[in-house]
Image: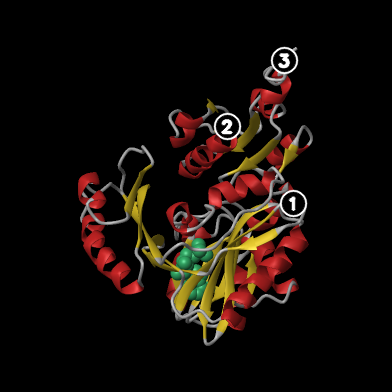
Amino acid sequence: MSSTNPAPEAERRLRRVGVLGAGQLGLMLGLAGRPLGLEFVFVDPAAEPPAKSVGEHLALDYGSPAALEKLASCEVVTYEFENVEVDAVRAVSNLTRVYPPASALAVAQDRLYEKSCFAELGIPTAPFFDVASHDDLKRAIGEIGYPAVLKTRRFGYDGRGQAVLQTADDAERAYAELGKVPLLLEGFVPFERELSLIGARSASGDVRFYPLVENHHREGILRLTLAPAPNVTPDRQAMAEGYMRAIFERLDYVGVLALELFQAGGRLVANEMAPRVHNSGHLTLEAARTSQFEQHLRAVLDLPLGSTELIEPSAMLNCIGSLPAPAAVLAVTDAHLHDYGKAPRAGRKVGHVTVRAPTVELLAERLATLRPMIESAP
Ligand code: AMP
């Protein structure tokens, strides 16, 4: 036999990764995984989700027997959507490895457990109270006062399922609207800006963090991310990383984690975490040595983690509702368009644009050219 014989079939087989959810995060995970020789199975009840083009798609409920059978054949299963039922994730965990672990998902998808976890770890949060009844709400307002923020414990996203309370009338109105499900009342944090930290921990405990980024929201939806966040001292970066390290250890975490923080009076106050790749990390595709998507795959497959260094100052603009004209975006130097292939709809994230520049001044100029195209898209 010659030494150039192909490797046996078993060695050449692609490594299969299962993903619960097949939205744009799944699409970008799939795109990042192909060069690593990975193939993907996505489970998502939607008929035509964005990730369908980068792997096999099962249009099934997450915990259905046929989905479980297929996922059992995967080397590792992860998720790109944190509102997957924890029981479905536990069922998959009985069949193959699942990262991040189901126990971390259970904490991250309930604002009460999440904030309690931060508080136990000494991570600053807004004051918070569980609101299971109208009496609880009155007691919590008595403790916190106004302004306060009433939020559903679960299933809130993009500013939905929450209300800022300035008066007793606001409280009654918000309770009438939200009070059919368990709630949390939080103190309003008079923050100077919103930051997020994205980090990763691999199955063997290797840890990496990206530089803090600055996030701008409108109507509860992320519109703009700047990387690195301007004027972050090494101490502040280290403080955020310390918080995330503590969370990693407490939750025995594996994968990419995003931690959303308010900067308020020199403090970093934790708002929430997402146990997955995150919208504020999309710019790592072009702006960092290793994207958050590749990093997540490396982490869950226990491969060496990659450099999180930023190549240049950069920004990400979300395309909400509709996409700008591609040719206009791509005419801007170092601008990159990501079209998720979703039907246009008000309030829906249908794509994003990343732009890089060698200096922050030049980045501001490029952003000033791009913003009107994106904000005025039909
Ligand atoms: P969330 O769904 O918790 O990420 O909240 C969505 C947005 O509402 C945040 O990005 C903040 O802009 C704002 N927000 C949430 N909670 C608070 C709070 N306790 N104090 C001030 N603003 C808040």
**Element under label 1?**
helix
CA–CA distance in space, label 1 to label 2: 20 Å
CA–CA distance in space, label 3 to label 1: 50 Å
The residue at the point 64 percent across, 34 percent down is 17
Q: Picture coordinates of residue 249 (x, y %)?
A: 76, 62
Please tell me the numbered disc located at residue 103.
1
Q: Picture coordinates of residue 323 (x, y %)?
A: 27, 47
The residue at the point 45 percent across, 76 percent down is 193
Mark 1–mark 2 CB contact (< 8 Å): no
Question: Which mark's residue is nearer the viewer, 2 or 3?
Answer: 3
- In the rendered image, is residue 175 in sight? no
Question: Which mark's residue is nearer the viewer, 3 or 1?
Answer: 3
The residue at the point 46 percent across, 51 percent down is 285
Label 2, on which residue? 43
Is 326 or 98 nearer to us in this picture?
Answer: 326
Please tell me the numbered disc located at residue 177.
none
CA–CA distance in space, label 2 to label 3: 43 Å
Please tell me the numbered disc located at residue 2.
3
Three-letter code for the amino acid on which mark 1 is drawn: Ser
Q: Is residue 372 above or below residue 122?
A: above
